[in-house]
Image: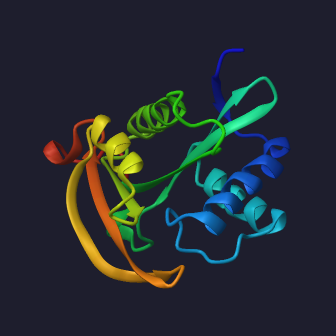
């Protein structure tokens, strides 16, 4: 079966919750320590969709292989042209280009909407897969926040990467 991308649907949420729970419980991509339940993830997704932002899934048949969404980078008004991406892949679906498909589509969708910058906040400087994915799609390293998280009995860095969307900072924003 081929992998296809589409906007997430309510029926995808149970699989999205399971994918995220795996990452929360076993990895450092998220600094959450307890996985949110279905109700919480439903609210989080609704908040993204209410803003008109993309929340995408990669599927193979009915199976969600991964998901990605863009949310506000910060809440203060001057940041309104900048988004933060989030992307999580089912551990059984990795190595098939799912991350590249999802993040490429997310970037394109956000650029079409007139956003100008995308920031990746990557948990753990050892997360080479996420760093490589973002670099492959035009993100540049902008900094490392050393030892800002503590998870699994050790201090963890946050890696900051950034890329321009559309014309970036070269012209005035089209959106108010």
Percent x, y of residue 122? 40, 61
The number of callouts visible is 0
Q: Nearer the viewer, residue 58 or 123?
A: 123
Q: Residue farthest to the left?
A: 170
Q: Residue at x 31, y 64 (%)?
A: 159
Which residue shows up at 45% across the image and 32% down it? 100
Q: In the figure, is residue 38 to the left or right of 108?
A: right
The quarter of the picture where residue 51 lies is bottom right
Q: Position of residue 25 (x, y in %)?
A: 66, 68
Residue 88: percent from the left, percent from the top?
Answer: 57, 49
Q: Nearer the viewer, residue 19 or 55?
A: 19
- Vertical side of 118 occupied by 125: above or below: below
Q: Quadrant of residue 35?
A: bottom right
Is residue 18 placed above or below 144 in the rendered structure? Answer: above
Tell me: 38 left or right of 76. right
Q: Which of the pair 37/119 is nearer the observer?
A: 37
How is the model colour-coded?
Answer: rainbow
> Going by the image, does 83 lie left or right of 32?
left
- Locate the N terminus and report the quarter of the image it occupies: top right
For image coordinates 28% across by 42% down, the residue present is 135
Q: Residue at x 61, y 64 (%)?
A: 26
Q: Pick out the residue farthest to the front.
A: 153
The residue positioned farthest toward the top in the image shown: 1
């Amino acid at each position: 079966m081929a992998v296809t991308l589409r906007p997430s649907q309510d029926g995808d949420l149970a699989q999205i919750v399971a994918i995220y729970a795996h990452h929360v419980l076993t990895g450092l991509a998220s600094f959450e320590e307890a996985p949110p339940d279905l109700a919480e993830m439903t609210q989080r997704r609704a908040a993204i969709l209410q803003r008109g932002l993309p929340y995408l899934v990669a599927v193979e048949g009915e199976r969600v292989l991964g998901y990605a969404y863009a949310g506000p980078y910060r809440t203060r008004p001057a940041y309104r042209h900048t988004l933060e991406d989030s992307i999580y892949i089912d551990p059984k679906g990795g190595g098939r280009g799912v991350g590249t498909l999802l993040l490429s589509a997310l970037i394109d969708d956000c650029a079409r909407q007139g956003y100008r910058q995308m920031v990746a906040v990557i948990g753990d400087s050892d997360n080479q897969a996420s760093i490589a994915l973002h670099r492959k799609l035009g993100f540049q390293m902008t900094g490392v926040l050393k030892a800002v998280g503590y998870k699994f009995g050790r201090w963890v860095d946050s890696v900051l990467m950034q890329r321009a969307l559309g014309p970036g900072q070269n012209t005035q924003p089209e959106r108010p």
